[in-house]
Image: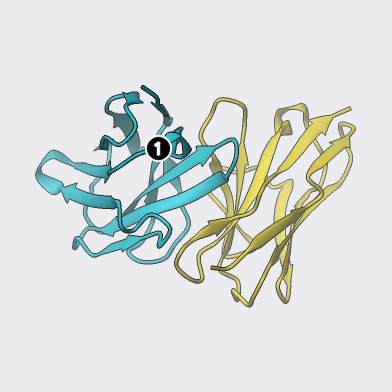
Amino acid sequence: DIQMTQSPSTLSASVGDRVSITCRASQSISSWLAWYQQKPGKAPKLLIYKASILQSGVPSRFSGSTSGTEFTLTISSLQPDDLATYYCQQYSNYPFTFGPGTKVDIK
Amino acid sequence: QVQLQESGPRLVKPAETLSLTCTVSGGPINYYYWSWIRQSPGKGLEWVASISYTTRTNYNPSLQSRVTISLDTSKTQFSLTLTSVTAADTAVYYCARSPTDGPNYFDSWGQGGLVTVSS
């Protein structure tokens, strides 16, 4: 199985800050990576797929990038509504695997 | 706007079978790829199984001996059965859709249902 790791595990930032979350794959997954946002008690919501393509309806402050097996989700200007846990998921190989999540708190 | 809704018993006894159904509304069931994903506090998000509209199936090897996914296009539903459950199978179970057939991300999710394994 492809192992996904995320850092940091928790992040506390102020409204308006630029925030970045990193996801690493244990082997090459090309750009077959998605990012999800999960708010407490809710299902995950797709933000980005194919590493950098913004899902329709997702605010443009979210963006994704890649460098080799390292992927980054960036929130350009953190908003109160962005309080959530963020997960990456690889879909290069079966079984699909998710990262352990990064919890974003608002200071 | 497609909507997915999980249904099924929320309490299952150890060693028995967990059965869940996902009803798809507001969109076609054909030409998409349908999955079950679960989330437990100890293991995070875990992909369980997927089925294409052509009924081609894929299973997580860690569960493959106990899990079956099926599709009923006439009812626009797909289902999950998990046999010989233990407390480790306690989780929120989500059904989800992928936008095209085959390995993919999940663009629509059901609200999820907590299934507890306990006597």
Disc 1 marks a residue whose amino acid type is Thr
Furthest toward the left, the residue is B74
Q: In front here: B110 or B90?
A: B90
- Quadrant position of the C terminus of chain B in the picture: top left
Question: Tag count in the figure?
Answer: 1
> Which chain does the numbered disc 1 sit on?
B
Q: Would you place residue A28 above or below residue B30 in this image?
A: below
Q: Would you place residue B80 above or below residue A83 in this image?
A: below
In the figure, what tint was chain A given?
yellow
Q: Where is residue B113 in the image (x, y as percent from the top left)?
A: 40, 28
Residue A22 relative to residue B21: left or right: right
| Residue at the spot of label 1 | B86
**Residue depicted at 20% across the width and 50% down the height:** B70
Residue A81 in view: yes
Q: Position of residue B86 (x, y in %)?
A: 40, 37
Could you say whether the residue bearing mark 1 is in a helix, strand or loop? loop
In the figure, what tint was chain B given?
cyan
Within the image, what quadrant is residue B85 found in? top left
Tag 1: Cα neighbours inside 10 Å, few (<14), some, or many (≥20)?
some
Residue B61 relative to residue A71: left or right: left
Q: Would you place residue A37 above or below residue B113 in this image?
A: below
**Residue depicted at 54% across the width and 58% down the height:** A97
Residue A53 relative to residue A81: left or right: left
Q: Where is residue A95 in the image (x, y as percent from the top left)?
A: 46, 63
Residue A14 relative to residue B110: left or right: right
Q: Would you place residue A69 above or below residue B25 in this image?
A: below
Q: Where is residue A104 in the image (x, y as percent from the top left)?
A: 77, 37
Residue B20 in view: no
**Residue depicted at 28% across the width and 25% down the height:** B9
Visual colour scheme: by chain
- Quadrant position of the N terminus of chain B in the picture: top left
